[in-house]
Amino acid sequence: MVNIRRVHIDELPMAAELANQVFCETGEPYMGTAFPTLFRPGITHSYGAFDDTGRLVSFMGLVPVSIASGSEKISAFSIGAVCTHPHYRGQRLAGQLLERCRQHAIDAGASVIFISGDRSLYTRVGSQFFGRIHQFELTREHAHIEPSGLWELRELELRDLFAVYAHLQHPTAHVEMSIGEIQQMLGAEAMAHVNQQQQKVLVAATSNGIAGVAILSVPHSSQDDQHPSEQDTTSRTGSIIECAGRPDAVGELWLEAIRRFELSSLTITIPWQDEPMLAVAQATGASSTTIRNGGTVMIVNGGALVAQTGLLGDTNDWAPVHMTIDHEDGSYTVHTPTDEYKLTNDAELCSLLFDPESNLPAAQDAAFTAVPLPYMYGLYFI
């Protein structure tokens, strides 16, 4: 008999151990330290399935998160570290945990759940791909561009923390975190662990402060005996986890990272709304592609999402663009200065709100602009 319930604080070490067994089979266990929002003491929102001896056999990490999107705030949850003991797979435990998490989010007043994954477990119950991210590939050829000399390009020092925090919390769309949380995330190095690499943080500094910051995932150095790197440096690929600050300063940090860490290439992900940063990346001449945001998103309360994005007409019908909701059939109507457009379901709502390249008629109206979101596989990765 399996009991499904919320995980208690004293059971978090057991959850981290299960996650280590599933995700770290071939390497050093890191889940408990790399994901402090899931496995460190505090108010727990995660759910688990326990056998009749009280042992945790399936786990779904659930964390509340506030997304700053322009002048609005989206109340959301994130799901990650989903794992089941091999002996208990095939029993639909994860599906039951997901339903508990969905109801938990609804009860808490959240509008969406961001999920670190795109398995059929999520998509068959309404989780969707979302958003647009521009991905650039810089190579050593681009790194030959000489630095401007305007900044000292160096690694992060403790005295930089307040300035780095201010930059990371400044973009149009970002995950809201306190300076303590930023410090914790920087120390946890989640994405670097997932990539089986190391994290490095570079800053562009002047006598007046920090102009830009770039958080990177790069291969381990050849001097690290525990993680020897390949002798062939043509395959040393790195990636930007997060960057912020003056776009021209950040651009120099990208090139410095290639030189300093002897990278063959550096992958940079920039959300569609960050036009100044996109301009700097495009100016390098690097090849680029457009991809979806990280993971998938599940709308758990469409009405709340419309309200939290500042589009609800009931309280904002003075705005040139607003939306109204038909609570009988669950449809949405988009009102612009020139027309009205009906959305019949949450899939269309997700496409319209989060995808700047949506092919819905409402998205083609010049008055409508998609809702900006941060890249969800950045520093705040669950």
Image (cartoon, helix red, strand yellow):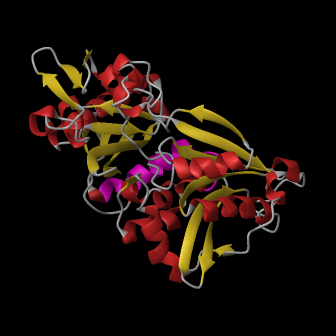
Looking at the image, residue 289 lies above or below residue 141: above
Where's residue 167, x and y in %? 47, 66
Is-magenta flag for residue 269?
Answer: no
Where's residue 179, x and y in %? 38, 71
Outermost residue on the front side: it is 338
Q: How many marks?
A: 0
Q: Is residue 91 visible?
A: no
> Which residue lies at the image location 39% right of the left edge and 33% below the top edge?
354
The magenta segment is 10-29
> Which residue lies at the image location 69% right of the left edge and 58% below the top edge?
254
Q: Is residue 114 left or right of residue 249?
A: left
Outermost residue on the right side: it is 232
Image quarter of residue 317: top left
Q: Is residue 101 left or right of residue 352?
A: left
Frontmost residue, 124 versus 171: 171
Where's residue 1, x and y in %? 27, 30
